[in-house]
Amino acid sequence: MRTGWRYRVGSVLGVVLLSGLAVLLANQAILQSLFTTYVPIFWRLEPTMLSGRALYAAMGLTVAVTTGCLIPLYKPRPRRILDIVALAHKRVLVAGSVLATLGFFNYSYRLPRATLLMAVTFLFVAVPAWFLIIRRSPNGTAERAVIVGDDPDTIAAVRDATDLPVIGYIAPPSGTLDTPIRAPITPDGGTVRGSTNLGGLSRLGEVFIEYDVDVALLAFAAPDRAEFFGALDTCYEHGVTAKVHRQHADSVLTSGFGSETLLDVELEPWDTFDHITKRLFDVLFAGIGLFVAVPIVAVIAVAIKLDDGGSILYGQERTATFGDTFRVYKFRSMVENAEDATPVDDERNPDITRVGRFIRRTHLDEIPQLYSILKGDMSVVGPRAVWTEEEFELEEVTDDWRKRWFVKPGLTGLAQINDVSSTEPKAKLRYDVEYIRRQSLWFDLKIVTRQVWQVLEDLTMTVLRR
């Protein structure tokens, strides 16, 4: 990726030229005639040509508005391809909305609706393409790597195992890099076999940008939850490939166990198409579910209040992607202040209320989580989000528990449809990792279908018992 002023100037000039070109192309009589004749959304629009001052004014305002709305993209920051496209699309639509608003108030300029829609359509395609073009370095140099770790021996082993040009290393302050091995190594300076210390873990994102890094080589001897997965999260956010030594691959998803000493970490197990369709499915499912559940929500809220007079919702910190946390809400089904990190079977739990027992059996306590899915904190299908306090206990009994953190937590999953919960952590982990390996939109649909059928069966059985 181009860095510094070259990236900023190139990105701004590209947007300026594309914005002006968009108006010029949209102002062509033959193109407007084709669009208003053959493209459905343009059928009701009249072809209108601008000329002279009106055309220059429209071009100037379009350039100014579009350039201003795309400011967040001018910072030279590596991003994943999907993030670049999504952000560019969002900002182009904002620019189009601003131009439409200005046109509505009939200021001295007037950009015809057909011209506006055609220009925004052009920019919707051209702007993301431009930022994808300039994100890579034009000189075709080999991949550049940094080492991120907390242990001198592991750093040296990773350095020996790679053929990539290593720029330097990042040393978390909690590491043991004050041990003099081969060369002085401290968080404040020193070298590892000729590699320069580039600072602490908080600078990892800046280092990726400043040195045009393609690969991060992870060299943690005893991975700390926050530091190790924080580094992976930064790699994911910036589109940098993460590699780990095969001896320290227990906590990550890798591309395979071949003869290579360093293995690629699968930061995003979903491919691009499935990633987009999964998110669309999540939004559609959660939106429809919340709309349909409005009367049910009202009844449950009243029932909880009448039962013991306590709060309706219950919030809890759960573990999300890369060990991050988010707050999830459910209808309260237990007496208040009865949290316990030790997993307990519902039938043996005396703290569950009368209403709580019903909404748990029928899964109606999960309805508020549809909002978390709509926000993007969760997905419809994925490993079940676990309470952060409970997570520590589960990690102690399952060595590979952290592999679940590579996808969004889900409302349901392969473990849930097989009636496996946190009371059986090893079986739960096995199902969760199997889901991550097999995941696809079609697999998600099959899991959701089975879960909906189970919910209907549980609801029917619960009602019949009463």
Image (spheres, grey):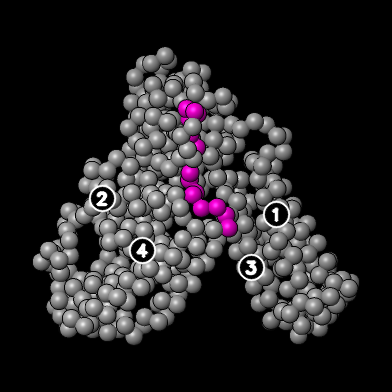
**Residue at image mark 2:** 425
Q: Amino acid at mark 3?
A: Leu
Residue at 60% of width from left, 51% of height from top?
81
- The residue to which callout 3 is attached is 93
The Cα atoms of the two marked residues, 2 and 3, are separated by 46 Å
Q: Percent position (x, y) of residue 267?
A: 48, 45
Of the two numbered discs 4 and 2 on the same chain, state the one appearing first in sequence: 4
Q: Tell me: 385 left or right of 19.
A: left
SS at badge 3: helix
Viewer can see residue 465: yes
Q: In front: 209, or 318?
A: 318
Secondary structure under tag 1 reads helix
- Give the x, y percent position of residue 100: 68, 76
Q: Check the image and name the residue furthest to the top.
A: 182
CA distance for labels 4 and 2: 16 Å
Q: Position of residue 80 (x, y in %)?
A: 57, 49
The amino acid type of the residue labelled 1 equals Ala
Secondary structure under the numbered disc 2 in the rendered image? helix
* Amino acid type assigned to the residue bearing label 4 in the image: Thr
**Tag 1 residue:** 129
CA distance separating discs 3 and 4: 34 Å
The segment highlighted magenta reads 259-273
Q: Is residue 10 magenta?
A: no
Q: Quadrant of residue 317?
A: bottom left
Task: Give the vertical position of 173 relative to 135 (above or below).
Answer: above
Say which element carries label 4: strand
Q: Residue at x 63, y 62 (%)?
A: 89
Residue shown at the point (57%, 37%) measured from the top left: 214
- Residue position marked by numbered label 4 in the rendering: 412
